[in-house]
Image: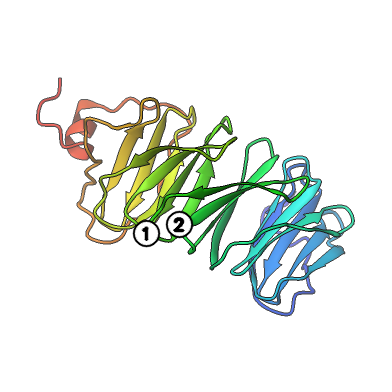
């Protein structure tokens, strides 16, 4: 493979392309576009395989299931499920009542969670398209949701200044993560699923234990230099890192460190 060499141009969309993703086996690409379609492409030839039509607005997000048999697409008004081989629509029984902000797939590919300005998240079965549960409790629009690494939990982030932890099988609310002074833009699990970090428009990130759910002793992660603007995104390192004493003073603002 020669670095930087163009292999193919995937032409066909009639509007801006918002996202592109590979299938897990690398054989196909799915694209999402403002032309109200998603498209499937063969990686080797660049040939268009299928056009996924049906959305009434621009398609913002597209994901493959891990086994490559399903494609999920989302526009601001609807979530659609498709057979990845034929491009046939698999009907989704219910829909959100307001703008859809994000979709996320469970690690095993069996479930989808969608979040909306209607203050709910919804859990769906990928094979059937049937709704499993509605995650109700937030007092504001839900910005984002993510599954824990083992797929047993979901955490949601909301404009109501909280994140919430849910059972991914039943949809039962487990805990409310309170403490931020502004909308929570994102929440993510650590790679081992034992902790959650949340980021907010209040300019802080907060670190939580999952079981039992509690804000860690640091209260909040103090960022250096101080952040005066909105925090939009945060990630965990995949491998555990031991902070040095200097790091703990600089990052966690610990006065005493040995």
- Could you tell me which residue is drawn at 25 percent across and 41 percent down? 221
- Dot 1 falls on a residue whose secondary structure is loop
Judge whether residue 185 can be spotted in this image.
yes
- Could you tell me which residue is drawn at 25 percent across and 45 percent down? 179
Q: At which x and y percent is residue 248?
A: 21, 31
How many other residues sit within 10 Å of disc 2, few (<14), some (14-19) or many (≥20)? Answer: many
Q: Residue furthest right?
A: 86
CB under 8 Å between callouts 1 and 2?
Answer: yes
Toward the viewer: 217 or 176?
176
**Vertical order, 18 against 68 (above or below):** below
Quarter of the image holding residue 14?
bottom right
- Left or right of residue 189, residue 18 in this image: right
Q: At which x and y percent is residue 246?
A: 19, 31
Q: Which mark is residue 159?
A: 1
Q: Which mark is residue 142?
A: 2
Q: Residue furthest top?
A: 258
Q: How many marks?
A: 2
Judge whether residue 233 can be spotted in this image.
no
Q: At which x and y percent is residue 101?
A: 53, 62
- Dot 2 falls on a residue whose secondary structure is strand
For the C terminus, the image quarter is top left
**Vertical order, 1 against 41 (above or below):** above
């Amino acid at each position: 493979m020669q670095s930087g060499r163009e292999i193919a141009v995937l032409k066909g969309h009639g509007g801006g392309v918002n996202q592109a993703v590979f299938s897990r086996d690398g054989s196909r690409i799915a694209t999402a576009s403002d032309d109200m379609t998603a498209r499937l492409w063969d990686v080797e030839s660049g040939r268009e395989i299928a056009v996924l039509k049906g959305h009434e607005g621009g398609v913002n997000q597209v994901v493959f299931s891990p086994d490559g048999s399903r494609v999920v697409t989302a526009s601001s008004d609807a979530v659609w499920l498709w057979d990845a081989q034929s491009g046939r629509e698999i009907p989704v029984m219910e829909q959100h009542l307001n703008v859809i902000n994000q979709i996320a797939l469970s690690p095993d590919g069996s479930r989808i969670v969608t979040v909306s300005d209607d203050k709910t998240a919804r859990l769906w079965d990928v094979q059937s398209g049937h709704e499993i549960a509605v995650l109700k409790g937030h007092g504001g629009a839900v910005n984002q949701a993510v599954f824990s690494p083992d797929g047993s939990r979901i955490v949601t982030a909301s404009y109501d200044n909280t994140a919430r932890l849910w059972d991914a099988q039943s949809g039962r609310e487990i805990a409310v993560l309170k403490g931020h002074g502004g909308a929570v833009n994102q929440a993510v699990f650590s790679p081992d699923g034992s902790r959650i970090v949340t980021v907010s428009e209040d300019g802080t990130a907060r670190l939580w234990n999952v079981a039992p759910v509690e804000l860690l002793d640091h209260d909040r992660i103090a960022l250096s230099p101080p952040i005066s603007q909105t925090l939009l995104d945060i990630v965990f390192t995949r491998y555990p890192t031991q902070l040095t004493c200097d790091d703990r003073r600089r990052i966690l603002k610990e006065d005493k460190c040995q």
